[in-house]
Image (tube, rainbow, N blue to C red):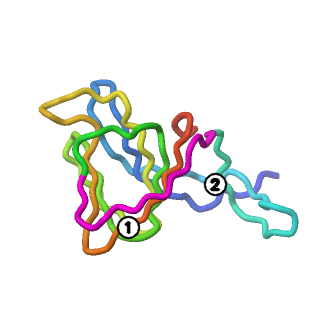
Amino acid sequence: MNPPLGPEIPYWDVFCDDNGISHQRRDSLIPNAMNTVSPGSAILWQYMTRNVPTKILFLTIPPGAKGDWHENPAPQWIVTLSGRWYVETMDGHRVEMGPGEISFGVDQGCRWVEGKRGHLSGALGEEPVVLILIQVEDQPTR
């Protein structure tokens, strides 16, 4: 008997369409296994990904910092630990994120359109933004 599926884990998917324009959409990971992490640990829901991490970065964005238009350097999971920040894609969609929110950036290959390519991002508010970036070989299995 298969274990029941666990609660969905929502994230923002930042991607480039077939016309080279970046967008954001809400997506989610659905845990597909129940297992322990190590002997003696509790059984918990897990989303088993086939993504191979290639780099893990811990970043702190100073208050008020803003970037220019750019693409994510590699497919990457971005997890907000503290502070608030935003991502704006070429289609004009702006998403603000705070602690515990996740984004997956896979907007490589966008084209320049009216001075825009990829996305804008920056810090919001008076406190620094602390992020974990987990770069992977490719996008998540859907």
Residue 110 marker: none
Q: Which residues are magenta?
A: 51-66
Q: Picture coordinates of residue 107 (x, y %)?
A: 37, 36
Residue 61 lies in quadrant? bottom left
Measure the C-alpha gap from mark 1 to mark 2.
23 Å
Residue 98 marker: 1
Q: Amino acid at mark 2?
A: Pro
Q: Amino acid at mark 1?
A: Gly
Q: Picture coordinates of residue 25 (x, y %)?
A: 36, 47
Numbered disc in front, either 1 or 2: 1
Q: Is residue 127 above or below residue 16?
A: below
Q: Nearer the viewer, residue 62 or 121?
A: 62
Residue at 58%, 38% in the rendered image: 141
Q: Secondary structure at mark 1?
A: loop
Residue at 41%, 46% in the rendered image: 13
Q: Residue furthest left?
A: 114
Residue at 36%, 70% in the rendered image: 83
Q: Does the magenta portion include 57?
A: yes
Q: Picture coordinates of residue 138 (x, y %)?
A: 54, 34
Which is more N-terminal, label 2 or label 1?
A: 2
Residue at mark 2 = 31
Q: Picture coordinates of residue 23 (x, y %)?
A: 30, 41
**92 left or right of 128 in image:** left
